[in-house]
Image (cartoon, rainbow, N blue to C red):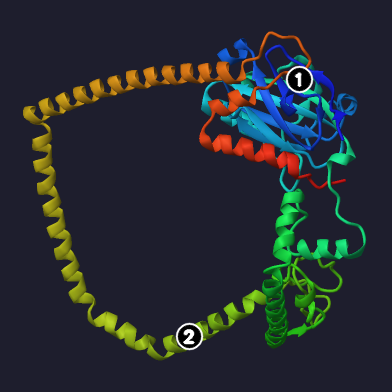
Amino acid sequence: MEKTILKEEKSTTLFKIALNGGNRVLSCATISVAWKLSQELIGKKPQYVVLCDHPIGFSKFQKDEHYSLGKRYILKVSDLQKFLQFRKPGVHHLVCIIFCGEEHKAAEKAWGYMRTEVSSDEYKKPIRWKEIERGELSETEYNGYITAIELELPRELFSYPPERGLGKIFWKWANYGFKTPRDDCKFRGRAFFAVTAKPFLVLPYRIIIGVVSMAYVLIGGILIFLFGFRPTFEHFFHGWLRRNEFDLDLYYFSEEIPYWGSGWQICRRWDKDSRRKFSAWLVPILIPVEIAVVSAIVFGALYLHKILSGISVTAVGGTSSLFTIIMVVGITFAIATTIAVKIYTSDKYQTRRSLKREKKLIKKSELEIREVEEKKASEQAYGNFLKKAALLSESNSDTIPVDLEIIRDSVSNTEKLRISFWATKAKICKPYAQE
């Protein structure tokens, strides 16, 4: 099914983004995103691109004034295009930010937009509606330029898991032990694995895990009982049922405190008012430590008086030997220091040192000149590359024709393979929708 996807665009005169090779209709949810740069922007040395997929429309974005969720991607401007695999049907808007300047500074600023909050999917730096309207980031030191485009992805472009019958059972078996597949191609690979090697690998694995987990709970309960804890065997068979059977942090609290630790609770204190926590992993560590401590105490009590008497007998001889060693080391150091000062202050040594310093300065200046020339040549070659492959035409048409042949001729063989791979995958693999 073909449907017009371009609904509205907040354009800037410095660059534009082209979706789906400039076509206003698409037949898949994996879309190529290319950027076309003006002559002025190429002169500012564009380095990095940050693409932001926001699953909301312009109207809601304008109302909220900023947005910090969604999915972001960072690329080099020289990559020329990126295939985005959308996972959610409905209205989206795609934000494109280009960072210019020196390579290392632009990289630092671009990666600043990729950092997320701790334990959250929210990005630290939100995208602001005012910046999109202005076409430039608020912080002038970022040297970044921004544009956005709104598009709509119909439900027919996505795949959905079967909801009933044998298809649902096979879906669960093929994805057992994995997350939800991204697209049809991923599921086809899992389906092939599910009917070939998976039965011979997963079933023995589950049997081993079940037996090991039962032994763990049983032995752990016995050891914990010896340390004054009352074991419970509520999770004796969980190794056969749970996927994350090795999530065994094993922290335990009294019944009055809500249990929030991860793992299996296989014991609790005899005293219900106790607020101490216990980890079963400490049992095999504590036992040899206690044996070592007791052995050290017994050994010290039996042999300490003999060790002290031996030290008192050799104390006088050891003192005289130590004094002799100190005297020899001191005299040797004084002689070596005197010789070194004489050599360092001689005219011959100073002249030779000055010549070496001058040669180093000449070599350093030549190296700096060569580095400046190489940098200029590299920047000129980079600018010529962008002018050939990504220069924005003077046309005022709504769509931007993207010549994929020019892109393929301008990039390395690895990039050619990547572009061909994604172009083929977009045609045969529908992504699974996340609603």
In the rendered image, the quadrant that contains the N terminus is top right
Tell me where residue 98 appears, x and y as whole percent: 65, 23
Earlier in the chain: of badge 2 and badge 1, it is 1
Tell me where residue 99 appears, x and y as whole percent: 62, 23
> Is disc 1 surrounded by few (<14), some (14 to 19) or many (20+) residues within 10 Å?
some
Tell me where residue 90 appears, x and y as whole percent: 88, 36
In the image, taking residue 162 as reference, residue 71 lies left or right, namely: left
Q: CA distance from mark 2 to mark 1?
A: 72 Å
**Disc 2 residue type (three-letter):** Ile
In the image, taking residue 365 as reference, residue 128 lies left or right, namely: right
The image quadrant that residue 361 belongs to is top left
Q: Which mark, residue 297? A: 2
Q: Secondary structure at mark 2?
A: helix
Q: Nearer the viewer, residue 281 or 293?
A: 281
- Does any portion of residue 137 appear in the rendered image? no
Tell me where residue 255 appears, x and y as whole percent: 85, 74
The image quadrant that residue 233 belongs to is bottom right
> Is disc 2 surrounded by few (<14), some (14 to 19) or many (20+) residues within 10 Å?
few
The image quadrant that residue 248 belongs to is bottom right
Q: Name the residue located 51 percent from the left edge and 86 percent from the top edge.
A: 294
Residue labelled with disc 1: 131
Q: Which mark, residue 382? A: none
**Disc 1 residue type (three-letter):** Glu
Q: Above or below — where is 226 with respect to 196? A: below
